[in-house]
Amino acid sequence: MAIEDAPWPYDLVPPSAPEVGVPTWECPKGICECHPVEGEREPVEHVITLFDAKARKMPGARCRVFEDGKQINLSQPFADEAACIRFDVDPRTKHLAIQWAPKELPLEASYPYQRFYHRDLGKTPREGVTRRLGNLGFSHHGLLDDNVRDYQRAYRRPSTGRFQDIETELAVFHDEGTLPPLPDPPEKGA
């Protein structure tokens, strides 16, 4: 379906980088004055699986993906039946901005979902966990161990705050788009 057939009833301003925590700006493509330009590169396909606030897949979700402030998913504005969006991106791109909503495009204040998405998952295991947690929405705190605890509580894992305790599971959930739905909260008095 073409972008002309895909309305977007929400704010048209692309989402921006988060303002809290550690500074996240990096030259998105390594082509600033401090980096020599190496010429054009062939785009690579990137795939992201879209989930709702309860970590349920969202097939058919309407989405917008921005690279350097420019919308790049004009030819595929909806997630497929597996809730995936596929688009070509410059291989040097480290971050993307994403907005998405259910295919019905509800006008409630909680939509659209927005995420500053890390394509570059870092060079260390700690960076990988930090960025994957951020991509999945577990980045509300300035400290990694607090974000790890949020993830552990949400998935009813022992709350240690140690990134090593979730590293393998998180990589599978994130990289393969297999994040399980969040369990319902326990009933009061149970």
Image (cartoon, rainbow, N blue to C red):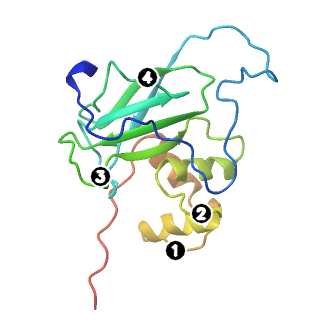
Marks 2 and 3, how far apart in space? 23 Å
- For disc 1, the neighbor class at 10 Å (few under 14, some 14 to 19, many from 20) is few
Q: Nearer the viewer, residue 37 or 174?
A: 37
Name the N-terminal-most of marks 1 and 3.
3
Q: How many marks?
A: 4
Name the residue located 39 percent from the left edge and 40 percent from the top edge.
99
Closer mark to the observer between disc 1 and disc 4: 4
Name the amino acid type tagged 4.
Ile
Tell whether label 4 touches label 1 (CB within 8 Å). Answer: no
Circle 3 sits on which residue? 56
Residue located beneath label 2 in the image: 165
Q: Residue at x 53, y 53 (%)?
A: 133
Establish if 107 lies above or below 40: below
**Of labels 2 and 3, the one closer to you:** 3
Q: Residue furthest left?
A: 104
Q: Nearer the viewer, mark 4 or mark 2?
A: 4
Q: Nearer the viewer, residue 43 or 27?
A: 27
Q: Amino acid at mark 3?
A: Arg
Mark 4, Cα crowd under 10 Å, few <14 / some 14-19 / many 20+, is some
Residue neighbourhood size for the residue with mark 2, other residues' Cα within 10 Å, grouped as few (<14), some (14–19), many (≥20): some
Q: Amino acid at mark 2?
A: Asp
Q: Quick one: SS at disc 3? A: loop
Would residue 80 be found to the left or right of residue 66 on screen?
A: left
Q: Is residue 190 left or right of residue 87?
A: left
Q: Position of residue 20 (x, y in %)?
A: 62, 56
What residue would you read off at disc 4?
72
Q: Which residue is mark 1?
A: 158
Q: CA distance from mark 4 to mark 3?
A: 25 Å
Single out the residue that lies furthest toward the bottom. 189
**Camera-side residue: 158 or 25?**
25
